Amino acid sequence: MFRPIEPTGEKRTVALQVEGKSIVARAGDTLAIALLNAGVTPFRQTPVSGRPRAPLCLMGVCFDCLVEVDGQQNVQSCMLEVQEGMQVQLQHGARHMEGDV
Amino acid sequence: MSAHREVDTLVIGGGIVGMSVAYGLARAGERVRLLDEGDDAFRAARGNFGLVWVQGKGLGNAGYARWTMAAAQEWAVFASELADRTGVDVELSQIGGLTMCLDEAELAERAGGLAAIRQQIGGDYRFEVLDLAQLRELSPLVGPDVVGAVFCPLDGHVSPLRLLRALFQGFASLKGELVAGVHVDAIDYKDGVFHVRTPSGVHVAGKLVLAAGLGNRDLAPLVGLDAPVKPNRGQILVSERVQPFLKHPSLHVRQTGEGVVQIGDSKEDVGYDDGTTLEQLSRITARATRCFPLLKNVNIVRTWGALRVMSPDGFPIYQASTTCPGAFVVTCHSGITLAPRHAGALTQWIRGGIEPTDIHGFKAERFHV
Amino acid sequence: MTHDLIVIGAGPAGISTALTAASLGLKTVLLDEQPRAGGQIYRNVTVAPPKVTELLGPDYRYGRAMVERLERSGVDVRHAAVVWDVARDLSVTAMQAGRSFQLRAPQLIAATGAMERPSPIPGWTLPGVMNAGAAQIALKSAGSVPSGPVVLAGGGPLLLLVACQLLEAGATLEGIVETSPTGNRWRALPHLPAALGSPTALLKGLGFMRKLRSAGVPWFTGATELMVDGQEKAQALSFKAGGRAHSLKASVVLLHHGVVPNTQLTRLMRVEHDWDTAQVCWQPRVDAWGQTTLDGLRIAGDGASIGGALAAERSGVLAALGAAHAIGRLSLAERDARAQPAIKALKQQLHIRPFLDALYRPPEWINTPADDTMVCRCEEVTAGRVREMARLGCQGPNQTKFFSRCGMGPCQGRMCGATVSQILAKELGKPVAEIGAYRIRAPLKPVPMASLAALFDDNHENHPT
């Protein structure tokens, strides 16, 4: 959905896994923008209806950019920067607990 | 002042108690008008845990224990009737409730209390004391710090939101009239008829039910009644939606039909302050995560304080006025559990029927010793 | 007390407040949720690459000096610190790296700024629909632009600014769809003389329009009936303009209808708010020194009323001076004397506001959308559902929240609150000020239970009961 206007070139890159697939992101980018640059859409399915969502505001007020990061669910991806080796899962509906009934 | 249609009964207070009574009266064929305050009123109806709760109620007051049990036993039919009439599913789940204990002393105390209630009401009072292994058969995610729980099969929970909405819709469908956003300034009793004055007009009826929660304290004396209720604060926290993992509610943790986890419980005497304190919120959360360690990563989305309507002994006040016949006061802090009784047996009494035996002891005179 | 002054928010107002306070010898701490100071307007300004800062222009680059001054100043700045509770005694609870900590000072200045007015239209929840400001954030913080066709819709200076910036950055603009009612022009005219007191701002606006027109970007005005088309994501924006129906292909639709104060914190603190009919938003009631109706709590910058970055900077100075006087660090005369330049500059900055507020007044249908439009994104509640609850007897947003769940999600009403208040005002025939707003409670942002539980365990030896 988004693309960098400058080639990555000298900018340090960071490798992360999104739903098991490797993507290369630019150091210093927020996770939300890294996902947008990688063409990830949607970011989640809502817990209410399962409808697809992606970021609206990129500044932490809309809560639509929620993904699972390194096992932590419902994290606002616009509020954290990418780290090498980050494991990202899309948020499929409501938070899941181990041992669901 | 303004011209209103003639009604049989005025009900003051649009919370769970008021709406249950108003709904019951309308269902019985009365012309009912309900007066309710505005958007920022205290509203215990909005702040509670939604428990349909029998266990532990009525220690030292067999009448209350029986009244509570009767209500719990009527809940399934009540919920079904509301669904049929309004299409609203109040999400009643009544598969039993747990009170989890974190040390043996607490477990023993609770079990002892239930045994005493059983004895006081003469036997028919089911409960079980479970150890951790037995508890985990019911609720697999319970943590290792929990030593056991008391289980009562009659307990359950309901959505307070859906219940109030169902009562509003049911009341409206039964031609009940709602006057919202008004405050009662004065009540006069003249020639056997009540005149209730609000800023937007005077409402007149032969019967008056005071169900205004904390507001009853000031309204009751106007019609020869006494309702010495005081606020008792409970702080509650709610989480984001979580996929279902908890079927049995408890006083401290429950999961709603939407998947939201609600945690509590606290009791504070702080006057008319519905704020929160980190002291209580953190204590409640620490307890909840000890009971269910997997809750540690779940996010809290909102917290609040809610003011219970508490009489001096914690039991309801149901009373008919003798100086102003036709006026009734109805107040309790278990409006959810007692809703079917308030819409049923209590309403029949208000309509001129016999006073249920179980509530004989709930007059205000008991406080005047 | 841990400090003399706590400041929340490191945008222009917060930085200015902190620097002023520190220069007066106040022991100050500045809390900000982002990893770097600058707020949104100067986001990333010290690390953005030259191509990006060039593109974003001198107004953006201006922020660099401010952020650098903060870094050199020695002010205690806590980055990535999310304030989630403020008690009545003004003690602040914030979370950093999963751990909560508490601070307290006799004076608290919230400079939490503004957010874009939500633009509820059919289809606005589809992936690919974003705020215009979001696209600017992507540019500032990552040098990224939408890769496919973009349509911008709405009204306001930011809409045109972002359009220009995207154009220059090489994005493909399919069109600009202005929704400001045509009548706005006439209502704005009486304010033009005052606006001429800020000629640079006006010229800037004209410059944007010229650039966009000469690039041949399709332009539509007085647009209505906006709808985003698409199943799993945005594919087009359809609308009516000039008496005809239009549809513009777009994989990214950028909406913007102005910015409004972010009132979560002031609502949490239960200070008095007024509904401003010119800016069509809630504003906390403040005096000339940012003091709210709660003693010791001040607001600086766009969080009080929208004035822009340069106004925010001056407002920050005044709030700091007010706080310094309140704790006895400055006499009244000293405070007033030091305030003169900021008061003068602030007044100058605000000359253009009435004109802009009138010219870009949002259309009614954005404030009170049609029944089938989703207003609560978190709980997926439509405007029609809210109206239905009002007809059932709800008198205000807290009751409709209880009956419909609208406002119960993680954003705690940021996206739906003002819309619901306006819908109810119209439905119940009462002024918005009388309808009121959501009761906001802690946490201001969701916090994990572990973090709350840890606060108890830190304070107690015994196990909880």
Image (cartoon, coloured by chain):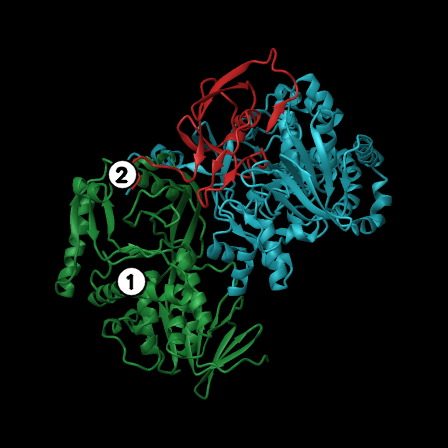
Chain colours: A red, B green, C cyan
**Residue C400, position as x, y percentages in the image:** 51, 57
Along the polypeptide, which appears first: circle 2 or circle 1?
1
For residue C154, above or below residue C3: below
Q: Secondary structure at mark 2?
A: loop
Q: Which mark is residue A75?
A: none
Q: Chain of mark 2?
A: B
Q: Which mark is residue B76?
A: 1
For residue B31, above or below residue B287: below
**Residue C411, position as x, y percentages in the image:** 52, 42
> Do callouts 2 and 1 mark residues in contact (Cβ within 8 Å)?
no
CA gap, disc 2 and disc 1? 28 Å
User: Is residue B278 among what the camera can see?
Assistant: yes
**Residue C19, position as x, y percentages in the image:** 65, 27
Residue at screen point 28% across, 55% down = B156
Of all residues shown, which one is farthest toward the bottom?
B191
Quadrant, the C terminus of chain C: top left
**Residue C108, position as x, y percentages in the image:** 57, 38
**Residue type, mark 2 in image:** Leu
Residue at screen point 84% across, 34% down = C203
Q: Which mark is residue B141?
A: 2
Q: Secondary structure at mark 1?
A: helix
**Residue type, mark 1 in image:** Ala
Near-viewer residue (B328 or A48): A48
